Amino acid sequence: MLAFTQSSLGTKIAVDYEQSSMNLKAYGVKDAAGRLFVTMINKEASMDALLSLAIPLRSGRGSVMRLTGPSLDSKSGVTLGDRL
């Protein structure tokens, strides 16, 4: 839930994505300043996901923040961006 804390303040928006055989979910939020936050969750323990986003040309710059940890159910050793 750490990732959602960073990107859940705003209005939910629809996100279209191709659902493969992976257990992957996507969520979109637009905040009061008009910034778009897309949260992608890969629930596959043994497989990385290759992702690409198609966004409007006039969206401005973007950034990526990764949530990582030793396992999917870790309570310690979890980082968001570069922070523990």
Image (spheres, rainbow, N blue to C red):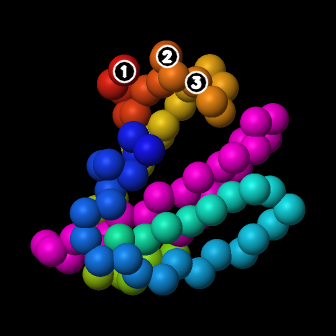
Give whichever of 78, 66 is nearer the camera.
78
Q: Which residue is mark 1?
A: 84
Observer-nearest residue: 21 or 61?
21
From the image, which quarter does the C terminus lie in?
top left
Tag 2 and tag 3, C-beta contact below 8 Å? yes
Q: Residues within 10 Å of mark 3 (few under 14, many from 20)?
A: few
**Cα distance between the residues tagged 1 and 3:** 12 Å
- Residue type, mark 1 in image: Leu
Asked which secondary structure carries label 2, the reply is loop
- The residue that mark 3 highlights is 74
**Displayed quadrant of residue 17:** bottom right
Circle 1 Cα neighbour tier, 10 Å, few/some/many (<14 / 14–19 / ≥20)? few
Which segment did they paint magenta? 30-53
Residue 77 in sight: yes
Distance in Å between CA atoms under marks 1 and 2: 7 Å
Q: Is residue 40 magenta?
A: yes
Q: Earlier in the sequence, mark 1 or mark 3?
A: 3
Indicate the secondary structure of the residue bearing disc 3: loop
